[in-house]
Amino acid sequence: MSKNLRKDALAYGLNEAAELEERDLPRYLRITDFDGDGNLREDTFRSLPREIAREALLEPNDVLFARSGATVGKTFMFRNYDGEACFAGYLIRARTLPWKLDPLFLYLFTKSTAYESWKNFIFTRATIQNISAAKYNYLAIPLPPLDEQRDIVAHVEEKSAEFRALFTCIESQIATLLAYRKSLIHECVTGQRRVTAEDVARAGR
């Protein structure tokens, strides 16, 4: 990721123990706190004293990269969060120049097959799966004009919303069918429902 696209250098987070759970303090983000879809988990909330957290406070639209571990290369975009947050040492923060590289465009790029191919290339040249800030400096990002970047982002966001709605609908239908199946089994085994030859024939089709 060229330095000409960033506000500042890629930065590592804090090496602090995650012990506090005080909601009025800055949240301490670790790799395990977000999933592959960019959602924060509430059940893993940890925080740090503000005087420690200020060394690595996040700004809206910062993008975090996992640098090691089983999920190396996993990314998270810090946005739509009500409160302060800082990040842990196994993460690397990228802060773009938004008039050159839309941060959401960067984040969506990390969900592409091109990014996966780049990661695999890095892994084949290393003895351990680790991507340092120095290596992320060489991440080549396609750079269409800013208006086009934003058009791409809008299109992907729209389609993603449609997929999420469809997924939710399918999940609801599956839950309804499973509940019906459970109810049907109960009625049959308790004698509340008589199983006819026609039912057996229909089930065998």
Image (cartoon, rainbow, N blue to C red):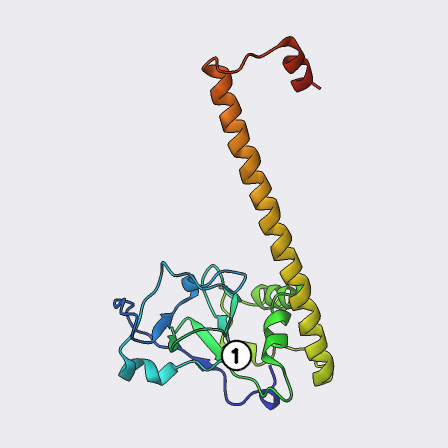
Residue at mark 1 = 61
- Name the foreground residue: 94 vs 155: 155
| Other-residue count near label 1 (Cα within 10 Å), few / some / many at <14 / 14–19 / ≥20 | some
Instruction: Residue at 64% x, 67% y: name it.
Output: 157
Q: Is residue 188 above or below residue 42?
A: above
Q: Quadrant of the C terminus?
A: top right
Q: Does residue 166 appear left or right of residue 34 in this picture?
A: right
- Name the foreground residue: 73 vs 110: 110
Instruction: Give the farthest residue toward the front.
Output: 192
Q: Which x, y percent locates residue 93?
A: 48, 78
Q: Which x, y percent locates residue 196?
A: 61, 10
For residue 56, say whether it is visible. Answer: yes
Instruction: Residue at 61% x, 48% y: name it.
Output: 169
Q: Which x, y percent locates residue 176?
A: 55, 37
For residue 142, say whether it is visible. Answer: no
Q: Amino acid at mark 1?
A: Asn
Label 1 SS:
loop
Instruction: Residue at 52% x, 68% y: name it.
Output: 75
* Corner quadrant of residue 90: bottom left
Q: Quadrant of the N terminus?
A: bottom right
